[in-house]
Image (cartoon, rainbow, N blue to C red):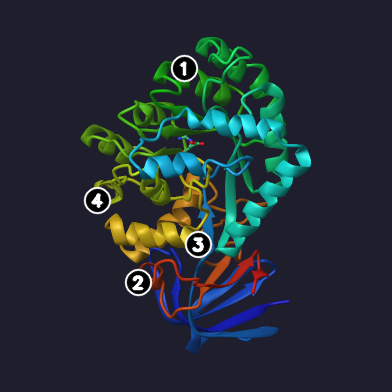
Amino acid sequence: MSELFTGIGELLTNDPGRPRIIDAALVVDGGTIAWVGERAQAPTADRHTFLQGRAMLPGWVDSHTHLVFAGDRSAEFEARMAGESYAAGGIGVTTTATRAASDDTLAALLGDRVREAVAGGTTYLETKTGYGLSVEQEQRAARLAAKAVDEVTYLGAHLVPRGPDGEPVDADEYVDLVCGPMLEAVRPYVRWADVFCEDGAFTPEQSRRVLEAARDAGLGLRVHGNQLGRSGGVELAVEMGAASVDHVNHVDEADVEALAGSDVVATVLPACDLSTRAPLAPARRLLDAGATVAIASNCNPGTSYTSSMNFCVGTAVLQMGMTVIEAVRAATWGGARALRREVGTDDRPAVGSVQVGARADLHVLDAPAAIHLAYRPGMPLTWGVWRAGQQVVA
Ligand code: NIG
């Protein structure tokens, strides 16, 4: 059954030829977009939904989250707000709590987080393992995630865990495990592998080993890079042809040029930058240099406990010098590009844009224009969400 939407006050499409249509209309048929244009030219359809001048955007594509976890780290956050700085070691606290949770508990926590993300307009979602850090626990996280989200990333290389004596295990031996039995155990459930290339986590050499093993196993590559310092993560992501390097808070001119000259998406994480009081990732500089920028929530218990892409996009406009069209594009098409899903294939439509043939993932705001995301920060602006043409939030 086809459905015609009219009364769209502002439609952002991500179509470079026509990024914004005022007084727009749209037809959805069979889960994909069949027609986009001005209301005056709209064809008829089986059903009609009138949106009373509200803005419509592509559903958010959140390309970086860590949703498989248990436990609470609000005390760590409170201490940070009182002047402590973020350190990778906190990952171990969540690992202990996550390992102790039953499958049912972990699946329920994950399900709640996915529902929260969808309620906020997210229609395509990636999440990572990385709070298990043993063969069995990483496999469990990957298995649970594969049931709950669209894309799963293996992040066994999140932190070198502690052994039974409480001391960190030998880092190179742990990398052997990550590249061998752990990779094999998660392989059926994941499309991507990631590594936290940073002081206190994995060196560029260890990170390269992880990425090479993952590539040899047929996985796509992602990197957590340059979050706490110039970690070498950007260079490594470019060298290895990763799909995305995420965080990019500490980059120099050479890093920016390398990203601009590559196919690696620079994923910025505005909520994480605020929560860790990090220098904001230089989204404006990256865009001006010609790099592809994505915005993601990085929802996780340590550095960014929010899946609100509305908040991330508002912050990118308010604090990172992005225009609203750039920020919405980065949080939709950019996220899809970071997951290599911005172009459709024979068996799956593109996500991240409102163009003919793309999956009908639509986010309607209770506002006449997308700029309200920054103009009215923190307000509950998500009015309706459609995923593959089905309304999932009313
Ligand atoms: O992307 N940086 C590494 N991983 C997460 C933080 C994880 C944690 O502290 O629990 C991030 O910010």
Amino acid at pointer 3 = Ser
Q: Is residue 251 left or right of residue 366?
A: left
Q: Residue 353: which disc? A: 3
Label 4 secondary element: helix
**Element under disc 2:** helix
Which element type, helix, strand or loop, lies under badge 1?
A: helix
Q: Is residue 272 above or below residue 211?
A: below
Mark-to-mark CA distance, 1 and 3: 37 Å
Badge 1, how many Cα within 10 Å: few under 14, some, many 20+? some
Instruction: Return the x and y of residue 362 as percentages of the image width and height.
Output: 56, 68
Q: Amino acid at mark 1?
A: Gln
Residue displayed at 46% across by 67% down: 13
Q: Nearer the viewer, mark 2 or mark 1?
A: 2
The residue nearer to you, when weighing 28 against 82, is 82
Disc 3 to disc 4, how far (Cα)? 22 Å
Q: Which residue is mark 4?
A: 288
Residue type, mark 4 in image: Asp
Q: Marks 4 and 1, Cα distance to the nearest angstrom?
A: 32 Å
* Contact check, label 2 and label 3, Cβ < 8 Å: no
* Residue 66 at x, y percent in the picture: 56, 41
User: How far apart in space, not on screen, are marks 4 and 2 (Cα)?
Assistant: 24 Å
- Pointers 1 and 3 in contact (CB under 8 A)? no
List x then y, in percent, for residue 96. Answer: 62, 29
Amino acid type, callout 2: Tyr
Neighbour tally class for label 2: few under 14, some 14-19, many 20 plus, Cα within 10 Å: few
Please name the residue that numbered disc 1 is placed on: 206
Numbered badge on residue 375: 2
Q: Residues within 10 Å of mark 4 (few under 14, many from 20)?
A: few
Classed neighbour count for the residue bearing mark 3: other residues with Cα under 10 Å, few (<14), some (14–19), many (≥20): many
